[in-house]
Image (cartoon, rainbow, N blue to C red):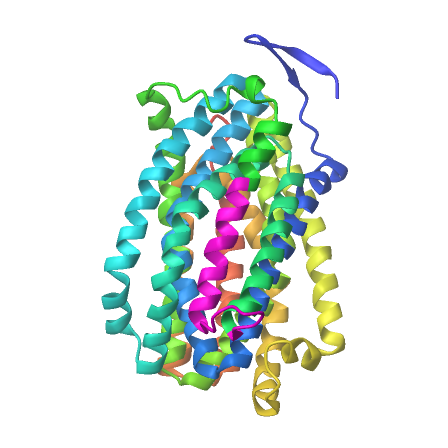
Amino acid sequence: MEPAFLSLRFYKLKIQTNYSNIWKIAYPIILGSVAQNIIALTDTAFLGHLSEVALGAAAIATIFYFAVVMLGWGFGLGTQIVIARRFGEGNYKRVGKTFDHALYFLLILAVFLLGFMEFQAPSILKSIVKSDAIFQASTDYISVRAWGILFACINLLFRAFYIGIAKTKIISWSTAFMAIINIFLDYVLIFGELGFPEMGIKGAALASVIAEVCVLIFFIVYTLRKTPVGKYNLFAFPKIDKDLYTRLLKVSFPMMIQNFLALSCWFVFFLLVEKMGERELAISNIIRSIYVLIMVPVWAFASAANTLVSQVIGDGNPKEVLPVIFRTVKLSFLCVLGLVGISLISPELVISIYTDEVGLIAETKPVLYVIFGAALLFPVGITLFQGVSGTGNTFHAMLIEIVVLACYLGGVYVLIEVIQLPISGVWISEYFYAGFLALGSWLYLRYANWKESEI
């Protein structure tokens, strides 16, 4: 890439939006996400072999945990968009100042969220979970897992920084490191192997917390040793800049609400499924784990699209936004198609990773076929939606998400409570979400005035 022109005191590099650069940004995120989902897969697999109650409780507790953490995730995504815009402008010193201000906010947010999880989560779960066994196991998990929030929020910020500057290889390295630690600790702490105490579902939670701590240390050491801290003015810890916080919150707050609502709605979905029975909940947790793994390329390419959209607008080239989004959609769709094709060869083998019970495998198989079709719609919906967020108009993205979630939850309620379909029919609701998200995002990008957005 050649220097285009001088911005402030920095040479700004021309942003590349071809297939090769999209892949260059996305594939380390894919590798990192694979490792992250291996963690989820092993958690589910180990707990599935522990008991059906532990398997169902893990679904409820994990989604509750991530619904709360989504507030930090949303702020991290907003920070990522702002960092990508400053990077596209060539204003590298503002990248570090944005990072430091986001760190101040996330430290306070993490402490608040930890307090909420410790003091409010048990009473909330007690009022909404039908099964006493599931409730007890869920609270056991959350009582330990909540402490990971302190470290997870800061890890999300490092992730936002490296995706925002399009240096994503560290994402794959850090997550692979996390996966290795988590898998080992899952094995020894859940079942009490190699002289470790047998902790059951609490062991899975503790393994995740320790893994988060190790990854934070990894990020800090890597950044200090390998990243040009001076170039970006990282860790300068400047005085509070109220104007910068105004910009950050303008972009991030809608994403915090949007992501919180999205995970909360999925939490409601699992609560409704839990009322159908412990077997249906166990099936849905297996499906959730497989589904999320298939969706790895979707979220990775969507992150790449989000970053590139913000960068090309900062580069003064908004006409490249739609082309880069549709190039990303094609790559994402091909990756998901490949994963679905591989899974169709032997779906029983895929399900058997989580359980060896023949009846549970047989009942899970029809649901798996349902989500295969939905997975092929998500490369379009998620990528278009992240393109909307990448423009910086995150308030409008939040409105799209709210409308889509209302339609989704309405569909779920009708399928479960009115039509009373079996669990395979209930998962058809994923088609509602993907389809409405794609339609709403495309209409916005096609007809709304977003090209002059400033952040």
Residue 347 image-quadrant placement: bottom right
367 horizontally vs 60: left or right: right
Residue 408 image-quadrant placement: bottom left
Q: Give residue 446's position: percent from left, percent from top.
A: 54, 41
Q: Give residue 323's position: percent from left, percent from top.
A: 66, 38
Image: magenta residue range? 191-217
452 horizontally vs 303: left or right: left
Question: Magenta part mainly helix, strand or loop?
Answer: helix
Where is 278 relative to 125, above or below? below
Q: Residue at x 50, y 34 (%)?
A: 81
326 horizontally vs 394: left or right: right
Specify whether residue 122 is painted magenta.
no
Q: Nearer the viewer, residue 298 or 151?
A: 151
Q: Which residue is drawn at 53% across and 47% down?
A: 214
Where is 41 relative to 388, above or below? below
Q: Nearer the viewer, residue 10 or 137?
A: 137
Q: Which residue is drawn at 71% across and 49% down?
A: 331
Q: Is residue 131 visible?
A: no
On-image quarter of the N terminus:
top right
73 horizontally vs 341: left or right: left
Task: Tell which residue pokes out farthest to the front in this image.
Answer: 195
Q: Give residue 395's position: percent from left, percent from top.
A: 38, 40
Q: How many labels does the image show?
A: 0
Q: Is residue 147 visible?
A: yes
Q: Give residue 152's position: percent from left, percent from top.
A: 45, 47
Specify whether residue 206 is painted magenta.
yes
Q: Residue at x 58, y 52 (%)?
A: 178
On-image quarter of the C terminus:
top left
Q: Nearer the viewer, residue 111 or 7?
A: 111
Q: Which of 287 and 110 is in front in this view?
A: 110
